[in-house]
Image (cartoon, grey):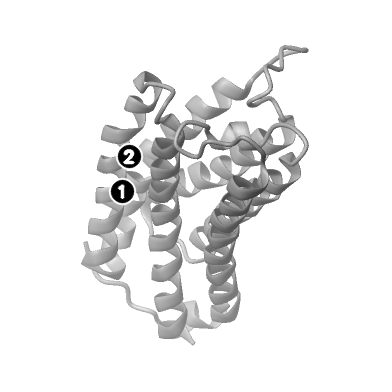
Amino acid sequence: MDAIDFDRTWRSQLQPDLVRYLSYAAIVGCITFALLILIADFVVPDHDWLADTISDLGAGRYEFIVDIGIYAFAGSLLATALCAAHIHLGGPRWSIGLIGVGLMALVVFLIGARNEYGDNDDEGVVIHVYLVYALGFIMTLAPWLMSGGAYRVGRMYGHSLVAVSIIWTISAPFFFFLPTGIDGIYERYLGLIAFAFVGVLARMYISLARKIA
């Protein structure tokens, strides 16, 4: 695939500051989510961070701590999708991938907004598990779909997205078969993979913003 050639016409239409700010916002959102999870681990009484999942932290008196973190991560995904749409790296695979990232932002927001986790909620239509399935499915495909465009910027970015897709695809299904004594820590490991996906794209767009500035 040919390397990107930023001609004058295209450069004049791009907003490098916007891309840079969105990329930093994506990184900050991930860090915020991680910090709030750590805070909740200490604040929520009788919490076992090895056994209890993030969903367990999101239920009860201190649910607002995790909810804020979830919304921050949804914002990270939205910022990433906006970058991917603003500087489109070509082809239908990239388009489908960026739409997937946008849908991930919506799914993550709904997970926080529905408050159906960790408290045996059975009122109305409970969609939490379906949202989790949707999130897992998109995370399997989106990094791979976007890897081709990332290769145009640098081999490291393309290789990283392929690695994220492979690691997630291998790792995620095991979560549903783990004993409850360790599923909390394993869920956090999966979260780090999702953070890596956002981090690779954010770092790539920061690099692109510098090139077109």
Q: Which residue is mark 2?
A: 168
User: Is there CB contact under 8 Å for labels 2 and 1?
Assistant: yes
Instruction: Give the side of residue 163 with respect to residue 190, left or right.
Output: left
Query: In the rendered image, is residue 51 in sight?
Result: yes
Indicate the position of residue 32 as horizontal and vertical percent values.
60, 60
Indicate the position of residue 28 as horizontal and vertical percent values.
57, 66
Instruction: Give the side of residue 101 with respect to residue 36, left or right.
Output: left
The structure residue drawn at horizontal position 61% and vertical position 31%, both measured from the top left corner, is 56
Crowding around mark 1 (Cα neighbors within 10 Å: few <14, some 14 to 19, many 20+) is: many
Query: In the rendered image, is residue 14 in sight?
Result: no
The structure residue drawn at horizontal position 31% and vertical position 53%, both measured from the top left corner, is 161
The structure residue drawn at horizontal position 70% and vertical position 32%, both measured from the top left corner, is 59
Residue 37 vertical position relative to residue 210 in the rendered view, above or below: above
Mark 1: secondary structure = helix
Distance (Cα) linking label 2 and label 1? 6 Å
Quarter of image, res 137: top left
Look at label 2 and name its amino acid.
Trp
Q: Which mark is residue 164?
A: 1
Indicate the position of residue 73 as horizontal and vertical percent values.
59, 51
Q: Quadrant of the N terminus?
A: bottom left
Quarter of image, res 138: top left
Seen from the viewer's position, the closer of residues 23 and 44 is 44
Instruction: Give the side of residue 156 with respect to residue 185, left or right.
Output: left
Residue 168 vertical position relative to residue 18 in the rendered view, above or below: above
Indicate the position of residue 191 as horizontal and vertical percent values.
45, 45
Residue 81 vertical position relative to residue 121 in the rendered view, above or below: below
Seen from the viewer's position, the closer of residues 152 and 80 is 80
Crowding around mark 2 (Cα neighbors within 10 Å: few <14, some 14 to 19, many 20+) is: many
